[in-house]
């Protein structure tokens, strides 16, 4: 009995060996044949759906500015796009056409004025409905950590553990002199990790009406694709560079922003002011890809405008709703991005009081910057003389 049991066991084991070999051989053939078909190989990066967003917010901040970051988290980051009525896309979004040379025909002063008039009228319309849109925004506070003392690093790491919104730049020393390098490293890290449609670069003293900005971008994206479908095959892709543009700014020859490497002209070319601007994904990817070859101009906003100057398919969208200069302009209810605001000002804007910062201005101080439309038909030295 034991012998019979032994031979049965031996025979069973011997019979399994060919089956195992056949199974392993089948796997090997599958792998070999699968790898001979290049059509099955994924092209490009494969993104985790959790890292896919419509809008990235790149908020440039300093390690010690914890109060500003906390204020931003508790104010405008809680806003999301609202569909107040159906007229926004039709009345307020303009997709410029291409001319016969393949150049984008940027908005005339008349078009800019017309869009602003429509927006101011739109603000007065009663709310017909508010829809919560499934809309993903990812805020990231960019902080350079190279050379930071241990206590600062520990505080930043703890902040990241709690909030998960710190973009840690280990190789960048955080300083004003390094802002352009900081921007480049930030774009490289974001482009490598995230899939997105648009990126807004913001200072940590800029308040954003994020609900309106997001609604505008959604409407722009939808209308752009409608236009492209209508002109399928006749127009190339259109990238977006959206902000408040300046032309013919004088090159800084001294001080903290002294520029030693700008040799293209005796004036800076057109660029969107650095308090806040928006770039489409293609432009961010270009900057990230060629970051090691791009000139590190002193001012990051001037650098971005210079890097993107040769492209003919960029919609340079000048928008007076971006109050993003070094000093706030006269307060207007239509302003969407508001630069040079303290943490207190941000909380007051979030509560509905937009203009309290003007109360803090010293009496008899310097005149406020004038607000202008940009004339793209004239040289940059003549661009900005038509006031709003």
Image (cartoon, rainbow, N blue to C red):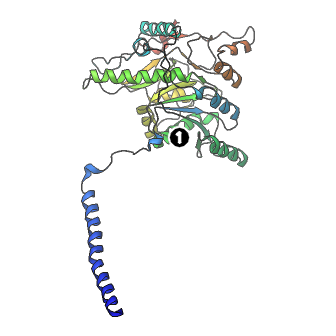
Q: Nearer the viewer, residue 132 or 182?
A: 132
Q: Nearer the viewer, residue 145 or 137?
A: 137
Label 1: how many Cα within 10 Å (few below 14, some 14–19, many 20+): many
The answer to whether 169 is drawn above or below residue 275 in the figure is below
Q: Nearer the viewer, residue 89 or 198?
A: 89
> Residue 86's spot in the image, x, y percent?
43, 15
Q: Nearer the viewer, residue 317 or 250?
A: 317
Q: Is residue 146 visible?
A: yes
In the figure, is residue 130 to the left or right of 333?
left
Q: Residue at x 28, y 69 (%)?
A: 23
In the figure, is residue 23 to the left or right of 71?
left
Q: Within the image, what quadrant is residue 90 found in?
A: top left
Q: Is residue 293 visible?
A: no
Q: Residue at x 41, y 10 (%)?
A: 108
Report helix, strand or loop for mark 1: helix
Q: Within the image, what quadrant is residue 1 found in?
A: bottom left
In the figure, is residue 224 to the left or right of 260?
left
> Residue 321's spot in the image, x, y percent?
53, 15
> Residue 213's spot in the image, x, y percent?
51, 22
> Residue 82's spot in the image, x, y percent?
50, 21
Q: Residue at x 64, y 42 (%)?
A: 162
Q: Look at mark 1 in the image and give the residue it sits on.
A: 185
């Amino acid at each position: 009995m034991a012998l019979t049991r032994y031979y049965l066991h031996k025979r069973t084991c011997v019979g399994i060996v060919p089956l195992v070999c056949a199974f392993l051989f089948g796997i090997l053939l599958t792998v070999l044949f699968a790898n001979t078909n290049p059509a099955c190989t994924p092209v490009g990066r494969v993104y985790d759906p959790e890292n896919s967003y419509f809008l990235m917010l790149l908020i440039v901040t300093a390690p010690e500015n914890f109060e500003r970051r906390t204020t931003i988290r508790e104010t405008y980051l809680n806003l999301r796009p609202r569909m107040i009525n159906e007229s926004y896309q039709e009345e307020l979004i303009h997709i410029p056409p291409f001319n016969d040379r393949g150049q984008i025909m940027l908005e005339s002063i008349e078009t800019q004025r017309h869009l602003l008039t429509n927006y101011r009228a739109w603000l007065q319309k009663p709310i017909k409905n508010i829809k919560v849109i499934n809309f993903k925004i990812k805020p990231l506070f960019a902080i350079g950590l190279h050379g930071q003392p241990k206590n600062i690093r520990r505080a930043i790491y703890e902040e990241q553990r709690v909030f998960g919104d710190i973009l840690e730049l280990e190789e960048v020393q955080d300083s004003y002199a390094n802002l352009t390098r900081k921007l480049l490293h930030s774009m490289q890290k974001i482009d490598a990790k995230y899939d997105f449609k648009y990126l807004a670069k913001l200072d940590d003293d800029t308040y954003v009406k994020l609900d309106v900005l997001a609604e505008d971008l959604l409407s722009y994206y939808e209308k752009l694709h409608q236009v492209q479908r209508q002109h399928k095959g006749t127009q190339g892709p259109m990238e977006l560079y959206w902000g408040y543009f300046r032309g013919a700014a004088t090159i800084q020859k001294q001080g903290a922003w002294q520029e030693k490497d700008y040799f293209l002209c005796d004036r800076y070319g057109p660029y969107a002011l650095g308090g806040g601007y928006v770039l489409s994904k293609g432009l961010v990817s270009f900057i990230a890809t060629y970051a090691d070859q791009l000139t590190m101009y002193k001012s990051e906003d001037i650098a971005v405008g210079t890097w993107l100057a040769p492209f003919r398919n960029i919609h340079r969208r000048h928008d007076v709703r971006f109050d993003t200069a070094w000093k706030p302009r006269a307060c207007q209810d239509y302003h969407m991005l508001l630069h040079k605001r303290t943490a207190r000002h941000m909380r007051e804007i979030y509560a509905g009081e937009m203009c309290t910062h003007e109360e803090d201005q010293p009496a008899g101080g310097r005149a406020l910057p004038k607000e202008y439309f940009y004339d793209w038909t004239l040289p940059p030295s003549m661009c900005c003389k038509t006031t709003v």
